Image (cartoon, coloured by chain):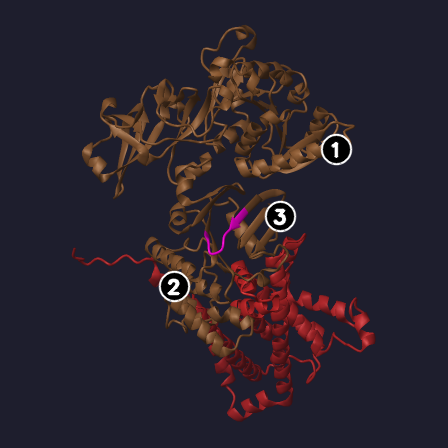
């Protein structure tokens, strides 16, 4: 491994801008860090270069730990977006800068310079000043300069940002060719997914300081694990569907798609499906579709963009229309479609035309949080709850919707629900919260978010589960949550008082197991803390230690919410608590399991 | 399309009027008085002119005026740069306050600064009383003059260099550092060359201001002929003696020397700018 980052964290004013990032870049690999501005990708690159210190973690280059090595001794080459050429020096002096610093002999310097200029195809421009070169040429000089001292690692910070499209592509090819020829391990930072696809051997996607996913470009595009990666890498329609033992369906329409996740504990639940615009099939009628019918729609907008035609289709009065993620209200549910020219010729469409939509390929995200459902005794209270800042920011960041539901546990206690609960149920904290949680869990909810009034966005999320059986689910939900808030994750392991010696070894092992599972299966970097004492009082003590804290609590027994953990759900002092409930196998009724 | 009797609209309207005003004011306020000065000096014959401007007292005053001004401008260039650097690069409590204080010498009547400096540096002043036992006399010597001129010129350097330092992108320093350069190397090879044009401008302004300074210097200099008498003061003496021609002659000399020096610095800058020419 030529570049290894191990749990790197960097904070600015206590806010983590790079949050527990671990990356391994292989020998000669071209690694692209992709993310929107402010995602921490440039900070991470500067940390690798040694220009920014890190608060936690380790960085090693070619097996040498450089965490505390100064930038000038790290042997990296860095290329900046704005070239950062020394304007008062000629091209030759710029390129020879690193060699002069190292007091290399003149003849060797000149030879190396000629070699580099040839590499970036700028022969003969030695005596020019940077001001006399075009942007593309300047960036070539910057690349040559960064390579002069034969660095072991090449780092590029949005190197094409300031260039126009044509030159950008040309330079992209040059850089790729140079990188291949030298076999130098390279990390490039960009916000442009097209650039990432064109250059990368491996892509790592960052958002809010976290590394969300790492993988080969094609895998990330076809099988993203998170909604952020699904929408950031190319366009994507996110649809809410339901997964049951019988498969996936949109409202009442069953779809012939495979779920990637196992059915959760036998219960039917809501999932997020990714439908790429190019995977949507349009036909005049449902019968003419060659793929799975999903809904009827009306074409709203047709745009010609050269090779492809882009359409926006509004879904019509199907239950699935209400299930679309993103746009907000059901009336605005729209699907983006792209068609190739042959497809367009087959069925020319204009705005206003009615079509049947089919899905050629659906990908089900493994994310356990699909949408939110604000539950309160009356519709008005539910509406108020939906406006809670934490719920609002979570749903916006997750690009999902908050449904409203008036519930009356007392009246409906015995009866069956008319409409199934979907997504994460959200309720207000308070005296009755524990009963409401129980009722919701009994009636099919898998996760319940208990919200005190005006709870701030958390800066630290504690994770705890009552039973190892719910570990996996709790970690999955925590990971999904933490991808959308800039908070630190802490697993709280609690050992009963009096446990001695060997009694403590087991919890310790569990702690480490939990950490490695979080990292490997869910991409979640979390710290672990071991507390000794009574469970609820230890959790309360940790939650009270600072402001803006939150708890994710995994349980397997519905009764636990109302008894053991009751005090955590009170309005005062009040912390947001996300309860994850998965019944143990024995509790699943035989008919559902079958 | 044909253009019939229509003037092409100018990008910047009112060019004629503005040029007219500019020329008028330049003539009325700058050129006319200067030519009057030269004319006045021309009123006397050549021998007397030469005698006036080359008298021992005059020569001593030139040396003091230009020497002290050059020294003050140089001191300002070094410390003004340091000051500007601190103000731009670091954030510390009181930064805004110090930034505001820099402009004080602009606003203060120069006589006031002169009196204040004299009070502080005189043999019994706050600082003077500690320097005197060491054998350093500040007030009523050339050192005092230099101190006054430094005070007067400081804001010119700081204010011209500040934006230039802001422009030195951190990226440049970062790039140099990743290429293996140490701090001093970066300072010498990257920062100084980039800031140099602005530094020279600041130097020029501070120098020009110092040469023409009168108010603050006459209080602290003591005005001893041949020792601490600056040329502007000598001119005033001649005026008080109603020897207008001699005063004008000295003025012409100051004007010529200043002009030559400023021109030289400007040429140096043009050359520097060309090297730094930015085209993106």
Going from N to C along the chain, the mark reached first, 3 or 2, is 3
Q: Tell which tag, 3 or 1, sits nearer the viewer.
A: 1
Q: Is residue A489 visible?
A: no
Within the image, what quadrant is residue A243 found in?
top left
Along the line of sight, the residue nearer the viewer: A96 or A175:
A175
Task: Identify the residue at the far bottom of this view.
Answer: B47
| Among the two numbered marks 3 and 1 on one chain, the one whose residue lies closer to the N terminus | 3
In the rendering, at what x and y percent does residue B78 appear? 62, 70
* Callout in the foreground (2, 1): 1
Q: Which residue, given by chain and number where applicable, does mark 1 sit on?
A: A502
For the point 61% across and 45% down, which residue is it? Answer: A11
| Mark 2 secondary-structure assignment | helix
Q: Is residue A526 left or right of residue A349?
A: right
Query: In front of the other: label 3 or label 2?
Result: 3
Q: Residue A110: image x %, image y %?
A: 45, 75
Badge 3 is on which residue? A57
Residue with the mark numbered 2: A137
| Disc 3 + disc 2, Cβ < 8 Å | no
Q: The brown chain is which one?
A: A
- Provide the secondary structure element on which disc 1 rests: helix
The magenta segment is A23-30
- Locate the N terminus of chain B and report the quarter of the image it occupies: bottom left
To which chain does the residue with label 1 belong? A
- Residue at mark 2 to residue at mark 1: CA–CA distance: 67 Å
- Residue A73: x and y in percent read 59, 63
In magenta segment, residue B110? no
User: Is residue A289 toward the left or the right of residue A75 in the image?
Assistant: left
Viewer-nearest residue: B168 or B163:
B168
- Picture residue at 50% right of the left edge, 14% below the top: A590
A340 up-or-down from A583: above or below: below
């Amino acid at each position: 491994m030529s570049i290894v980052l191990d749990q790197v964290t960097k904070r600015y004013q206590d806010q983590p801008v790079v949050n527990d990032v671990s990356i391994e870049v292989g020998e000669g690999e071209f690694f692209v860090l992709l993310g929107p501005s402010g995602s921490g990708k440039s900070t991470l690159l500067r940390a690798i270069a040694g220009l920014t210190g890190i608060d936690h973690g380790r960085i090693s280059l070619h097996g040498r730990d450089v965490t505390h090595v100064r930038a000038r001794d790290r042997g990296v080459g860095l290329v900046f977006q704005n070239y950062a050429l020394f304007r008062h020096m000629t091209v030759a002096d710029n390129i020879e800068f690193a060699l002069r610093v190292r007091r290399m002999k003149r003849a060797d310097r000149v030879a190396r310079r000629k070699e580099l200029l040839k590499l970036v195809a700028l022969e003969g421009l030695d005596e020019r000043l940077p001001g006399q070169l075009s942007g593309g040429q300047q960036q070539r000089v910057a690349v040559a300069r960064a390579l002069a001292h034969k660095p072991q690692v090449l780092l590029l910070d949005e190197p094409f940002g300031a260039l126009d499209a044509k030159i950008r592509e040309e330079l992209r090819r040059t850089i790729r060719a140079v990188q291949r020829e030298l076999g130098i391990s390279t990390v490039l930072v960009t916000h442009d997914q097209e650039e990432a696809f064109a250059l990368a051997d491996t892509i790592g996607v960052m958002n809010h300081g976290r590394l969300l996913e790492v993988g080969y470009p094609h895998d990330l595009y076809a099988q993203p694990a998170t909604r952020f990666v699904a929408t950031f890498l190319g366009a994507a329609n996110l649809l809410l569907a339901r997964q049951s033992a019988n498969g996936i369906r949109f409202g009442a329409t069953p779809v012939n798609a495979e779920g990637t996740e196992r059915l959760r504990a036998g219960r039917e639940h809501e999932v997020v499906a990714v439908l790429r615009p190019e995977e949507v099939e349009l036909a005049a009628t449902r019968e003419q579709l060659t793929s799975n019918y999903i809904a009827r729609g009306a074409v709203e907008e047709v745009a010609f963009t050269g090779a492809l035609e882009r359409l926006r289709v509004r879904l019509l009065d199907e239950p699935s229309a209400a299930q679309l993620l993103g746009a907000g209200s059901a009336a605005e549910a729209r699907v983006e479609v792209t068609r190739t020219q042959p497809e367009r010729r087959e069925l020319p469409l204009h705005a206003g035309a009615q079509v049947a939509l089919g899905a050629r390929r659906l990908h089900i995200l493994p994310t356990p949080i699909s949408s939110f459902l604000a539950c309160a005794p009356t519709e008005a209270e539910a509406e108020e709850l939906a406006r809670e800042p934490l719920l609002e920011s979570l749903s916006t960041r997750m690009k999902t919707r908050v449904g409203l539901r008036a519930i009356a546990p007392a009246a409906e206690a015995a009866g069956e629900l008319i409409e199934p609960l979907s997504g994460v149920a959200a309720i207000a904290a308070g005296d009755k919260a524990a009963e409401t949680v129980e009722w919701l869990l009994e009636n099919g909810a898998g996760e319940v978010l208990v919200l005190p009034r005006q709870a701030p966005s958390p800066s630290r999320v504690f994770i705890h589960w009552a039973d190892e059986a719910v570990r996996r689910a709790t970690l999955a939900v925590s990971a999904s949550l933490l991808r959308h808030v800039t908070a630190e994750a802490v697993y709280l392991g609690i050992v009963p008082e009096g446990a001695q010696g060997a009694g403590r070894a087991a919890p310790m092992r569990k702690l480490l197991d939990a950490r490695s599972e979080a990292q490997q299966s869910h991409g979640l970097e979390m710290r672990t803390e071991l507390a000794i004492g009574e469970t609820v009082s230890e959790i309360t003590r940790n939650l009270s230690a600072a402001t803006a804290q939150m708890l994710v609590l995994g349980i397997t027994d519905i009764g636990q919410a109302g008894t053991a953990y009751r005090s955590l759900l009170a309005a005062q002092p009040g912390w947001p608590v996300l309860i994850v409930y998965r019944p143990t196998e024995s509790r699943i009724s035989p008919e559902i399991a079958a | 399309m044909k253009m019939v009797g229509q003037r092409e609209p100018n990008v910047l309207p009112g060019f004629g009027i503005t040029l007219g005003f500019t020329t008028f004011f330049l003539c009325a306020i700058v050129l006319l008085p200067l030519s009057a000065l030269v004319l006045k000096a021309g009123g006397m014959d050549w021998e007397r002119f030469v005698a006036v401007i080359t008298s021992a007292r005059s020569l001593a005053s030139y040396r003091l005026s230009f020497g002290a001004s050059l020294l003050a401008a140089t001191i300002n260039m070094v410390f003004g740069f340091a000051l500007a650097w601190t103000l731009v690069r670091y954030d510390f409590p009181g930064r805004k306050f110090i930034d505001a204080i820099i402009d004080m010498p602009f606003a203060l009547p120069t006589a006031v600064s002169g009196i204040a400096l004299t009070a502080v540096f005189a043999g019994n002043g706050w600082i003077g009383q500690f320097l005197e036992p060491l054998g350093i006399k500040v007030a009523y010597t050339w050192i005092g003059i230099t101190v006054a001129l430094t005070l007067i010129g400081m804001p010119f350097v700081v204010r011209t260099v500040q934006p230039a330092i802001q422009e030195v992108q951190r990226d440049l320093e970062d790039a140099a550092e990743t290429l293996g350069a140490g701090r001093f190397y970066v300072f010498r090879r990257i920062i100084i060359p980039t800031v140099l044009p602005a530094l020279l401008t600041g130097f020029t302004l501070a120098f020009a201001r110092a040469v023409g300074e009168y108010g603050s210097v006459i209080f602290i200099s003591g005005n001893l002929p041949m020792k601490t008498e600056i040329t502007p003061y000598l001119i005033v003496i001649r005026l008080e003696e109603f020897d207008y021609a001699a005063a004008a002659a000295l003025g012409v000399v100051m004007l010529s020397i200043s002009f030559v020096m400023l021109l030289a610095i400007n040429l140096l800058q043009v050359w520097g700018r060309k090297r730094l020419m930015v085209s993106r």
